[in-house]
Image (cartoon, coloured by chain):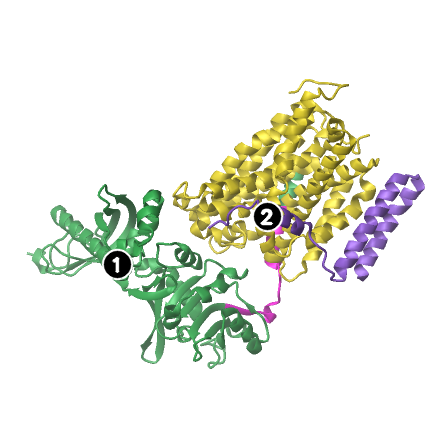
């Protein structure tokens, strides 16, 4: 009996290892796609698709021994009326079928996003080889150019973009929206989809990319943008702030204290009062370190900490409100308040709110409680200043 | 008189029922269309509905120990009406086997090897089942506990790997589904995973202690139902409101496993487990089909007709539906209605008539 | 086509001799009957001739004739 169990376990383990061999293809026959960009073409009915293919033979050689002109990637571009048609068109250039399981980023240009993404999203969800964990981004300008901006330390632009999005937590100024998250927001009747914005920045001869802010969608059409602070306002509410920098005015307003967010937790409770008002109770718990200050004041004192914490809370509230105000102009519910109400007040939602939620969204009232705590002041307990010298 | 002389014990029966119910785990999908994020409630309700129905099967079998349902029909309804009712059973077994065979064909065609022709999967799978059935009921029953153990382990593991990305607020709001859709969903779930175990009416006759069967069958049903529940909960918690758009919610949720970018593509596990489970279920169905056909024709053994029957089944499963879409749409309506009288009422009515006519006359035993 | 023929010849070779030897007439007839049905169906399938599905008939009978159908889920 014991033996049988061991044997079965061994067989199962071996099966697991074999999964990788499934539909096995040789490396030399593969065109490994690591990123896809979609632009509008000259013909309004078609799109231009750029697939970033890894040039395996050049990988790791650029700069040192390799041919300086050849890049470790190749942006193959074609036009087609649909994504799948365009992807198959590329085989005319590559001679091989594209291998997309490693495609980590899908970038749409802004003008495509403004016309609507439904028709350009279906393929990525339907194709068995794609992953739902791939990131979706919106490019200011051309998606093809974004995929060509070569970073200094990273060889492959698409991998660079992937890393940029993945590490959004350092500033919480953008948000990693996966295909799954995006489609989930798209399906929801209330919640508006969002996607991070990416743009090319020209610095001297080099082109860099920068990801910051969010594009806001109504149904599948992009209608608005959030800047960095507004984005973080959104993230506070949906509990996705990982870390970041908070700039808080000091009590005497002589300068600013800069805090690093250590932990942040956001909770939302919807309430519909008896007279039909909608109140969102937002509760945020925040811990931060003093990382920098620009004044000569001695901040590390209990009473000043109190005031700083209040100021910090005020900054958070402002960020949240700025995000709400921006989104209420277009009536796009980026926070998902509608779904929260739907979950709690199912009947009222269907009877009164569902129909014109867009309008009702603009009348929501807020009750925001931010509980900020300063946990440490890092290596200094006093600022470097002559005031204390005497 | 009986076409099969092998004996199985009640513990094996428990694992057989569990494995049989689990074999339909993919079909939770059909219910998701109707009940969306409330599918778990439909599964619970279905267990409650299925228990008395399945109990009527067991009660019928324990009243006629050692006999299969074809023989029981002859005794209760007389030779002509009995044969007609038996034909209904056989028709059901034949179609159900072809559906399961088709399920596996579509699974492989869509998710695992998209480039191969489906008839190949259908034939290979049916022949494998035929091989298992050729060996008889006992070997199948003897591996049942291994199959159940493997599937439980894998399901649990997948659940744990996904727990990180589960969002349990996805189940809210409760009771957001129209009543008719809920009933529809319960109908699908009771009919397909649970009541298809009517095939066990061909197997109960081979039990060594028929009187004790009821308890084990019901527990088998509940533990199989537990796995269905686990899958329904997992898929909704992971996929949220997107749960309705996927061809297979189980595959899609498992595809989201990404632990340190190393443990990925675990969806293949679903394929492996599904193959094993449907193999088990389909083998039992094929066994029920072969024995019932042999019984109604008065053959001494089902072995001579096994291969021709399998061949007919392969063609049937290749042509029974035009496409996976047809499969899903038909199963949600005609596919559950045609069997409703058989699954929910026939065994109970048979039992009732047997009680009224005080059957069986010769060797009457007390019902458990 | 050629596959179908080969497979059915194989099945016949494996199954027929013991049946004839043992003189089980009932089994033999049952086997031959099912064998012919299976063979004809397979040939039709291999020749791409459409075989009507029993589900089509059931669908007509249940959904259209008897009107048993759940409303389309939203």
Would you say A382 lies left or right of A68 here?
Answer: left
Q: The chain drawn yellow is chain what?
A: B
Q: In which quarter of the image is residue A21?
A: bottom right
Q: Residue at x 51, y 73 (%)?
A: A86
In which quadrant of the rendered image does the N terminus of chain A lie?
top right
Q: Residue at x 58, y 55 (%)?
A: B325
Question: Helix, strand, or loop for circle 1?
Answer: helix
Q: Which mark is residue A338?
A: none
Residue occupied by mark 1: A328
Q: Residue C63 carries which label?
A: 2
In which quadrant of the rendered image does the C terminus of chain A lie?
bottom left
Nearest to the observer: residue C12 or residue A387: C12
Q: Mark 1 to mark 2: distance in Å?
A: 48 Å
Q: Chain A is drawn in which colour?
A: green
Nearest to the observer: residue B267 or residue A73: B267
Would you say A162 lies left or right of B314 here?
Answer: left
Would residue A243 be visible to someone looking at this image? no
Q: Quadrant of residue B114?
A: bottom right
What percent of the width, then of the height, locates residue A170?
Answer: 32, 59
- The boundaries of the magenta stretch are A12-33
Nearest to the observer: residue B305 or residue A169: B305
Q: Which chain carries label 2?
A: C
- Mark 2, Cα crowd under 10 Å, few <14 / some 14-19 / many 20+, is some
In the image, residue A74 sits, relative to residue A270, either above or below, namely: below
Q: Chain C is drawn in which colour?
A: purple
């Amino acid at each position: 009996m014991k033996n049988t169990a061991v044997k079965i376990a061994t067989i199962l383990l071996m099966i697991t290892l074999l999964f990788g061999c499934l539909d096995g293809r040789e490396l030399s026959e593969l065109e490994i796609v690591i990123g896809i960009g979609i632009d509008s073409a000259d013909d309004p009915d078609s799109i231009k698709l750029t697939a970033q293919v890894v040039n395996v033979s050049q990988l790791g050689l650029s700069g040192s021994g390799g041919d300086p002109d050849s890049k470790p990637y190749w942006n193959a571009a074609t036009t087609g009326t649909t994504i799948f048609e365009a992807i198959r068109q590329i085989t005319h250039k590559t001679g091989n079928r594209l291998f997309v399981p490693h495609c980590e980023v899908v970038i749409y240009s802004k003008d495509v996003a403004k016309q609507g993404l439904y028709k350009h999203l279906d393929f990525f969800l339907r194709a068995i080889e794609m992953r739902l964990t791939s990131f979706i981004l919106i490019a200011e300008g051309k998606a093809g150019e974004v995929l060509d901006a070569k970073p200094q330390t990273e060889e492959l632009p698409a991998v660079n973009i992937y890393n940029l999005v993945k590490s959004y937590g350092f500033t919480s100024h953008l948000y990693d929206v996966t295909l799954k998250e995006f489609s989930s927001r798209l399906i929801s009747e209330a919640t508006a989809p969002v996607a991070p914005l990416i743009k090319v920045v020209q610095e001297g001869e080099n082109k860099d990319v920068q990801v910051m802010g969010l594009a806001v969608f109504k149904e599948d059409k992009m209608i608005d943008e959030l800047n960095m602070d507004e984005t973080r306002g959104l993230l506070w509410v949906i509990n996705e702030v990982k870390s970041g920098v908070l700039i808080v005015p000091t009590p005497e307003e002589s300068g600013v204290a800069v805090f690093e967010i250590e932990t942040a937790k956001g909770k939302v409770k919807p309430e519909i009062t008896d007279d039909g008002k909608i109140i969102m109770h937002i509760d945020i718990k925040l811990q931060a370190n003093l990382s920098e200050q620009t004044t000569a004041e001695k901040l590390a004192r209990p009473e000043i900490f109190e005031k700083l914490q209040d100021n910090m809370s005020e900054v958070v509230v402002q960020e949240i409100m700025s995000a709400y105000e921006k989104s209420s102009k277009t009536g796009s519910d980026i926070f998902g308040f509608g779904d929260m109400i739907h979950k709690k007040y199912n009947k009222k939602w269907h009877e009164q709110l569902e129909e014109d939620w867009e309008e009702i969204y603009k009348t929501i009232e807020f009750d925001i409680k931010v509980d900020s705590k300063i946990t440490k002041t890092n290596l200094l307990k006093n600022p470097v200043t002559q005031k204390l010298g005497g | 008189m009986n076409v099969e002389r092998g004996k199985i014990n009640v513990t094996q029966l428990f694992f057989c029922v569990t494995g049989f119910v689990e074999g339909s785990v993919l079909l939770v999908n059909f219910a998701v269309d109707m009940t969306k994020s409330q599918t778990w409630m439909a599964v619970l309700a279905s267990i409650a509905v299925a228990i008395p129905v399945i109990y009527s099967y067991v009660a019928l079998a324990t009243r006629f120990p050692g006999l299969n349902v074809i023989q029981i029909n002859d005794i209760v309804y007389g030779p002509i009406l009995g044969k007609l009712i038996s034909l209904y059973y056989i028709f059901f077994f034949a179609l159900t086997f072809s559906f399961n065979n088709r399920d596996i064909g579509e699974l492989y065609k869509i998710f695992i090897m998209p480039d191969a022709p489906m008839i190949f999967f259908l034939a290979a799978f049916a022949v494998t089942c035929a091989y298992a059935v050729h060996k008889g009921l006992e070997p199948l029953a003897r591996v049942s506990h291994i199959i159940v153990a493997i599937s439980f382990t894998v399901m649990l593991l997948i659940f744990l790997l996904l727990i990180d990305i589960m969002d349990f607020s996805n189940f809210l709001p409760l009771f957001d589904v129209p009543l008719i859709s809920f009933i529809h969903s319960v109908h699908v779930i009771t009919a397909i995973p649970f009541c298809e175990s009517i095939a066990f009416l061909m197997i109960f006759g081979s039990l060594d202690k028929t009187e004790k069967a009821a308890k084990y069958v019901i527990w088998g049903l509940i533990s199989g139902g537990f796995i269905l529940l686990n899958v329904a909960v997992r898929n909704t918690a992971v996929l949220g409101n997107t749960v309705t758009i996927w061809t297979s919610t189980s595959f899609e949720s498992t595809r989201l496993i990404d632990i340190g970018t190393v443990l990925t593509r675990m969806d293949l596990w679903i394929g492996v487990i599904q193959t094993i489970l449907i193999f088990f279920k389909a083998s039992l169905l094929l066994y029920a089909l072969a024995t019932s056909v042999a019984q109604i024709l008065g053959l001494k053994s089902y072995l001579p007709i096994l291969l021709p029957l399998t061949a007919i089944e392969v063609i049937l499963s290749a042509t029974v539906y035009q496409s996976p879409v047809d499969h899903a749409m038909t199963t949600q309506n005609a596919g559950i209605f045609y069997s409703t009288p058989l699954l929910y009422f026939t065994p109970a009515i048979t039992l009732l008539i047997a009680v009224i006519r005080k059957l069986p006359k010769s060797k009457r035993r007390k019902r458990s | 086509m050629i596959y179908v023929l080969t497979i059915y010849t194989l099945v016949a070779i494996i199954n027929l001799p013991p049946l004839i030897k043992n003189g089980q007439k009932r089994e033999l007839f049952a086997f031959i009957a099912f064998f012919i049905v299976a063979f004809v169906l397979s040939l039709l399938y291999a020749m791409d001739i459409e075989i009507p599905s029993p589900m089509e008939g059931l669908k007509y009978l249940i959904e259209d004739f008897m009107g048993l159908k759940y409303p389309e889920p939203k």
